[in-house]
Amino acid sequence: MSIATELAPAPGRRVGLMQRVVNHRADYLYVLPALAVMMIVIAYPVYYTLELSLFKTPANLQMKDKVYVGLDNYVTILTSQSFRDVTVNTLIWTISSTLISFLLGLCAALALHREFAGRGVLRAVLLVPYVVSAVAASYVWKWLYHSDFGVIGALSVQFGFTDRPINFLDNLYTVLPSLIVVNIWREFSFAMIMLMAGLQTVPDQLLRAAQVDGANTWQRFWHVTFPHLKGVSMVTLLLLMVANFNSFIIPWVMTGGGPAGASDIWITQIYQLAFGRQRWGLASAYAVILFVVLMTLGYFYVKALTRGDEARA
Amino acid sequence: MAQVVLREVVKTYGNLYAVNHVSLTVEDGEFVALVGPSGCGKTTTLNLVAGLMPISGGDIYIGDTLVNDLDPKDRDIAMVFQNYALYPNKTVFQNLAFPLKMRKLAKPDIERKVMEAAKVLDIVHLLKRLPRELSGGQQQRVALGRALVRDPKVFLMDEPLSNLDAKLRVQMRSELKRFQRDLSATVIYVTHDQLEAVTMADKMAVMSGGVLQQYDSPAQVFDNPVNTFVASFVGSPAMSLVPLTAVTRGTDMSLQSPEGWNLSLSPANARKALSASSDKIVLGARHSTVRLHKQASPGAVPGKVYTVEPTGDITFVQVYLGAAVVVVSLEPSVAISPDEPVWIEFDQNKMHLFDGETTMALKAA
């Protein structure tokens, strides 16, 4: 008999939180090591970022010289033009990457759902972008886009689309779309896998019933398949969105946020503020804003995940 | 409603015949059960009629139309599935309206037809609910309703009752039969439960290994099974089958068991036995036509009680005659215990004889 059960209060009696903790002290003891690790690696950095966001920090990393400025950092960020520009970039980046990746993934999943020769091979090939290192892929794409040596530029000249190779990455208007293409290429297969798993849960009999009821292919998809994919679609979209808000590797490796900030998104901006310009306080405030946005998304993610359970309960 | 004709229908998967030259006619307003064990091709046959899979050979007519190459939606059929196959995200009303909506009926027409069907099935109060909020029986009715609203030429039903519990199944069985009668609907009904087939169907098609074994009224199938498969499949408990050897002694003919006992045959049965392709004969007997004696009795053959199964008003006794098992039904008052030696008497007028080689029922030559 454990301590916990010995000391457990009689059912029906309300007990305070502290009393309950004391009653279950053995249980807490067991999770303490894990809790301690979590505190050190997660809770402390979060706290320290919050703290730093309220200070003006010296560039020389002498944190003892930091000056308390209240919410000044937040005001500076939220009122700056660059924040607005970067936010617009981030939204364009996140929304278009997420939606197009999802739609492409859905098409791929639907195409791969029916049986045909070579399906397994195709599925494996489509997974490659998701599996290869993002840094390596970014370098490869940088070369593909290169204005002098890039395959894409050469082909577009050869096929007569353009007179001379486009300088994709060194142009204010083409740089962000070009990076988004790379991002979509990388992550659409994630959506594909998720949706393929979802497709397997669509009951065959339901599709047959719809067929007998007179639904054509599109109507069967819309009335039977798609409703079944709702849950997994929500989860996929949210995961993609969080990942895209947090993107760093592709823009950092390929352009570093340039030219002239045209491909700067929140994370690259934060990185530059912190490690480029040593503005730790400002960067921390920026990170806190991003944190709030992501936590909001995270809330909806958990809600979407548990919605099915509530419905069943 | 309409007649359905299957002519030499074939469905193959590679070298495997899932449906092997099946021909049968379902008359207008008839309730036909396709029955057989798992994998006998009954559901495949139904799917071929529905058009859910391409046919490999033969012809299917619904009414006067050859439907081989028609889409399911153009065949004017409605189907009821084993798992009901209700659209989980649609209300009962939307489920019932779906086939009409797909046919682009006007809204008032859809509403009228759905209400009609809902009234017939007594599900009006459920129209706003989602399928998951319904009991199995209610879901079954909705599935039936979705078939009804269409007013199709043929109803195809794929084991529609097998997900229900035993009590509800019996109840729905009679309701289903009643609907069919009231609508004089043409129904093709797939089941693995021979009892469902016997109780509901005007005709039953017994299938095995993709081949149609017998197509006749349940009474005919029960009384005159064409072969040992049908004999052992239809009826509960199944017909007892005893493999024996025919022996002729002068003008008398008898069946001899490996254990050595002899069973004399009546002249009529002897004539049947003579038409067999060899001396191997299988004797078949329903439990109700077999008598059990506790003492040796003329014409009775010796056996040993294996199990006693009281069911309330009838007690079934399984008796080993050598290696074969014979089921006998007794009054529950008869005291009998396992391993007791008993004697079995077959009714010469009601016994069945099958060819031991071809398994076909023997007829007097």
Image (spheres, coloured by chain):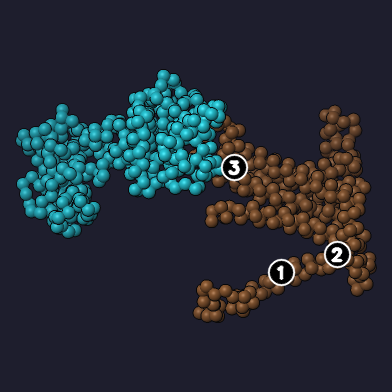
Chain colours: A brown, B cyan
Image position of B111 with respect to B283: above or below: above
Across and down, in percent, residue B31 comes to: 34, 31
Nearest the eye: B340 or B187: B187
Asked if badge 3 and badge 2 are on a common chain, one would say: yes
Image position of A273 with respect to B283: above or below: below
* SS at mark 3 in the image: helix
Report the Cα–Cα distance between label 3 and label 1: 38 Å
Q: In the displayed structure, does residue A135 sit left or right of residue B113?
A: right
The mark nearer the N terminus, 3 or 2, is 2
Across and down, in percent, residue B138 comes to: 43, 44
What label does residue A53 carry, if any? 2
Q: Nearer the viewer, mark 1 or mark 2?
A: 2
Do tag 3 and tag 1 residues touch (Cβ < 8 Å)? no
Q: Quadrant of residue A111?
A: top right
Q: Characterize the local packing of mark 3: few (<14), some (14-19) or many (20 or more) Cα atoms within 10 angstroms.
A: some
The mark nearer the N terminus, 1 or 2, is 1
Residue sitting at x 67%, y 71%: A34
Q: Amino acid at mark 3?
A: Pro
Q: Amino acid at mark 1?
A: Met
Tell me if I can see residue B350 in this picture.
yes
What label does residue A38 carry, if any? 1
Residue sitting at x 81%, y 58%: A289
Nearest the eye: B243 or A14: A14
Q: Nearer the viewer, mark 3 or mark 1?
A: 3
Q: Amino acid at mark 2?
A: Ser
Q: Characterize the local packing of mark 1: few (<14), some (14-19) or many (20 or more) Cα atoms within 10 angstroms.
A: few
Q: Give the chain of mark 3.
A: A
Nearest the eye: B68 or B63: B63
